Image (cartoon, rainbow, N blue to C red):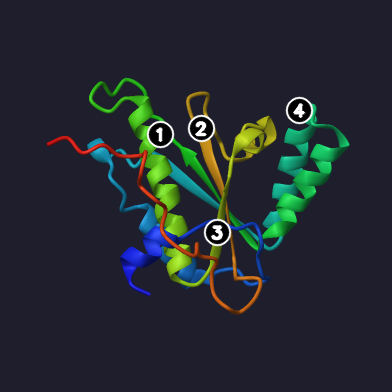
């Protein structure tokens, strides 16, 4: 598949097989995240790879978030499912440097978001499915503490990564999105 077709048809899924990227594939995924647009070359992100026994730790952090935010038994069960869904999760933390007038915090957050997406694309390009998880799951105190987040830092994503559930390849949209209503050309 050519690159443009891939970029126009990629999509996330929450269905994963059992295989995680190996060490070399994971390195390539992380390297892709390090090459995103980065005004001021601040590298305002840090990555934490959960795999194998680390997934048990992640489950505890997600369950703690469910309790912290009053999500009840249903939330605790969802946390357990999330932590077992994929064989690898990469947490992306926006490490915000305050007092950089030419690179405000919002721009540093965008860079961390771009790094997240670049890692998803790199995983997809190597034949792995991905899904970006956020919401309350990334705001739990236990996870923030485990990832050494300072007050100004933000966990922007938990990127689930794993082999396709079936061996047909990664999940793709059947066709590109229609751009009508999303763009205006100014001549």
Q: CA distance from mark 1 to mark 4?
A: 25 Å
Tell me which label, 1 or 4, sits earlier in the chain.
Answer: 4
Mark 4 crowdedness (10 Å alpha carbons): few <14, some 14-19, many ≥20? some
Callout 3 secondary element: strand
Residue at which label 3 appears: 130
In-front residue for pair 9/139: 9
What's the residue at 41%, 41% (across, down)? 112
Tell me which label, 3 or 4, sits earlier in the chain.
Answer: 4
As drawn, 28 above or below 139: below
Determine which quarter of the picture holds residue 88: bottom right
Q: Is residue 137 left or right of residue 80?
A: left
Residue 50 rendering spot, x and y as whole percentages:
62, 55
Which label belongs to residue 68? Answer: 4
Residue at which label 2 appears: 154
Tell me which label, 3 or 2, sits earlier in the chain.
Answer: 3
CB within 8 Å, label 1 to label 2 = yes
- As drawn, the residue found furthest toward the front would be 180
Which label belongs to residue 109? Answer: 1
Q: Is residue 183 left or right of residue 175?
A: left
């Amino acid at each position: 598949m050519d690159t443009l077709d891939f970029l126009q048809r990629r999509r996330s899924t929450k269905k994963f097989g059992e295989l995680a990227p190996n060490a070399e594939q994971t390195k390539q995924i992380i390297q892709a995240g390090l090459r995103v647009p980065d005004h001021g070359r601040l590298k305002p992100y840090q990555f934490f790879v959960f795999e194998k026994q680390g997934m048990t730790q992640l489950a505890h952090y997600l369950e703690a978030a469910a309790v912290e935010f009053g999500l009840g038994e249903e939330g605790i069960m969802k946390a357990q499912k999330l932590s077992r869904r994929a064989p690898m999760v990469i947490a992306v933390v926006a490490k915000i440097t305050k007092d950089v007038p030419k690179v405000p915090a919002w721009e540093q957050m965008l860079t961390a978001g771009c790094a997240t997406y670049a890692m998803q694309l790199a995983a997809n390009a190597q034949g792995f499915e991905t899904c970006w998880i956020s919401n309350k799951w990334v705001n739990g105190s236990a996870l923030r503490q485990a990832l050494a987040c300072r007050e100004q830092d933000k966990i922007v994503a938990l990127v689930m990564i794993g082999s396709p559930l079936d061996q047909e390849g990664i999940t793709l949209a059947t066709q590109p999105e229609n751009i009508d209503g999303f763009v205006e050309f100014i001549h």
